[in-house]
Image: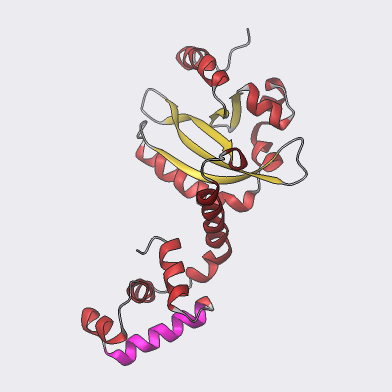
Amino acid sequence: MEAFSNNKNLDMKIRSFIPSAEAMPAVIIIQQLEPFESIYMNENGLKGLGLTLEELRKIGNDYLQNFFNLDDAEDFLIKLKNMLDSRETNESFTFLQQVKLKESPDWVWHIGSTRIFFQDAEGKPTHLLTTAIPIDELKHIPNKARRLLAESEFLRSNISKFLQLTNREREILRLVAVGKSSLQISNQLYISTETVNTHRKNIKSKLGISTIFDFTQYAQAYDLM
């Protein structure tokens, strides 16, 4: 049988993992980081993409471009970098991703979770393990799934506007969102109420918002609360 890698320990780990992966009601993927290549995917995932494992491995770095909406990539890459930098094998992160499946003309939303699968002798992560499930299969959490999708779309659509805010404006955005008045913010930050109101006006202009609800939506979406 063809090896998954030229590392005996890695190959043994993958082979011992396969029976569990094939039994899971989800898509299971093992990916090599350098160079990027999907070296294993369970039958559930291969069937969805309409590929054999050999075909998948030949795609190499084009895998993401061929099957995923790259507009979702920014949040994923930030979380991935943080995890790889930490080198914590018990750490994982969750993300939303749109996938192009063989039998679907539209993007299909998946919720995925990624963690480090293998490290080299120096502890540097070399391979990732990802589990993904189509959201429409999560019948027990439809409302939560819709909220996650809405938040993901809000984050992606408004990040350029949010990044225009200064640190002080983000601080005031948060305080307004939790119900602080201009006078209370003035006293807390040791600035005049006129300065607070100027910041509030600038925030509204940059974000294109007008209500306290709008302030709260941005503060929650970008983890200011």
Residue 91 horizontal/vertical position (percent) = 37, 36
Residue that lies at the very extreme toward the top in this rendered image: 1
Residue 210 horizontal/vertical position (percent) = 49, 82
| Residue displayed at 51% across by 76% down | 207
Query: What count of labels does the image hold?
Result: 0
Taking depth in this image into account, of 190 and 127 the one nearest to the observer is: 190
Where does the N terminus fall, quadrant-wise? top right
Residue 29 horizontal/vertical position (percent) = 56, 28
Taking depth in this image into account, of 156 and 178 the one nearest to the observer is: 178
157 left or right of 52? left
Per the image, is 130 magenta? no
Establish if 146 lies above or below 62: below
Establish if 85 lies above or below 192: above
Q: Is residue 26 visible?
A: yes
Residue that lies at the very extreme toward the front in this rendered image: 140
Q: How is the image coloured?
A: secondary structure
| Residue displayed at 52% across by 13% down | 15
Q: Is residue 33 visible?
A: no
| Residue displayed at 60% across by 30% down | 37
Establish if 168 lies above or below 224: below
Kindly indicate the quadrant of the structure image that contains residue 85.
top left
Per the image, is 200 magenta? yes
103 left or right of 167? right
Which secondary structure dominates the residues rendered in magenta? helix
Stretch in magenta: 192-206
Where does the C terminus fall, quadrant-wise? bottom left
